[in-house]
Amino acid sequence: MPGVLFLVLLLGCGGPSHDAGETPAIDEPLNPPVHISMAALHAAGGVPEGWRLEPPKGSAERGRAAFARYGCHTCHVVQGESFPDGATDASTGPELTGMGRHHPPGYFVESILSPSAVITSEPDAAVTARSSMPAYPDMPLADLTDLVAYLSSLTEGGTHDHAAMMAAARDLLAARAARPRPAPPPQDATMFFVQRYEVLPGRLAAFEEWFAARGRAEFRAFDGLISIDTYVDDGETTTLTTVFGFRDEAAVAAFMRDPRTDEVGLEFDAFIGPHGHQVFARPPVYRAPSLSAE
């Protein structure tokens, strides 16, 4: 695979040890079923629009016990959690604090069954061919769904690495400087914090109501946040892009360090699917007046 591979290598390095006894029942998925004709399914490329693997809902409590039973805690740190014989080498596996906010359940499933499917590395670092984490292709489905439920429940902590994001914004600006494109219209904001996401099924009305009643005011309370604009891209999938415009670099850095950002961010995230966060030194989307007509 060309280039640097991204995302997070997950889960433990110890061997499994299954509890004897009756296998726990697995709950049904939360999302309603998708109804689509076979012809439309084939035309869409074999999967419905916006499809991603959605495993059955497991038990986070049982998953925490499985996390310890499989020895995951010997290689991975979860801030705020205490396990017997905890991580002996935190560098063996990435820290999992807050991972539930950054990845969908299907990603956790693949990371457990096939850890080498995604290898993480820093830019310019040597990329290893395989993960050092053992695969668990024979893990019982009940254990798998419970582990995924536990990882998905890890939504606290893991705040934004503002220094890395600011450095990435500078690198991105430098890399794109030579690309020909019209200049953006003049505006007061000079730095932009961006989220791209899909709204969870059945949550759009509640999302709009929350933003009108609480979200708009909570975000605008941050000093230096000048604008909030959300754009709808109805291309191959229906994606929303929310752009938070800031006065300057200091304002967006303060926003990412502020504990209130995580509080209002968790409220925002309750309505949307998995997403990333990016910082830009120019608007990521804008109207080009030189190529537009009234």
Image (cartoon, rainbow, N blue to C red):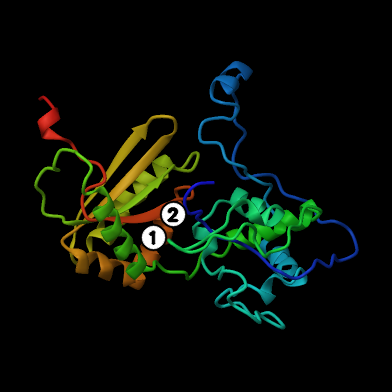
Q: Are marks 2 and 1 in contact (CB under 8 Å)?
A: yes
The answer to whether residue 177 is above or below residue 87 is above
Q: Secondary structure at mark 2?
A: helix
Quarter of the image for residue 281 reads bottom left
Near-viewer residue (250 or 214) = 250
Residue at mark 1: 265
Q: Residue at x 45, y 48 (%)?
A: 272
Circle 1 packing at 10 Å, graded few (<14), some (14-19), many (20+), is some
Q: Is residue 222 visible?
A: no
The answer to whether residue 122 is above or below residue 183 is below
Q: Which quarter of the rendered picture does the C terminus lie within?
A: top left
The answer to whether residue 89 is above or below residue 113 is below
Near-viewer residue (56 or 180) = 180
Q: Residue at x 48, y 54 (%)?
A: 4
In the rendered structure, the answer to whether residue 116 lies left or right of residue 269 reads: right
Residue at mark 2: 269
Q: Position of residue 195 (x, y in %)?
A: 36, 50
Q: Position of residue 280 (x, y in %)?
A: 26, 54
Q: Residue at x 20, y 51 (%)?
A: 282
Residue 23: give its label.
Answer: none
> CA separation, marks 2 and 1?
6 Å
Q: Position of residue 204 (x, y in %)?
A: 41, 41
The answer to whether residue 102 is above or below residue 183 is below
Q: Secondary structure at mark 1?
A: helix
Circle 2 packing at 10 Å, graded few (<14), some (14-19), many (20+), is some
In the rendered structure, the answer to whether residue 140 lies left or right of residue 104 reads: right
Q: Residue at x 38, y 46 (%)?
A: 196
Q: Mark 2 is on which residue type?
A: Asp
In the rendered structure, the answer to whether residue 238 lies left or right of residue 117 reads: left
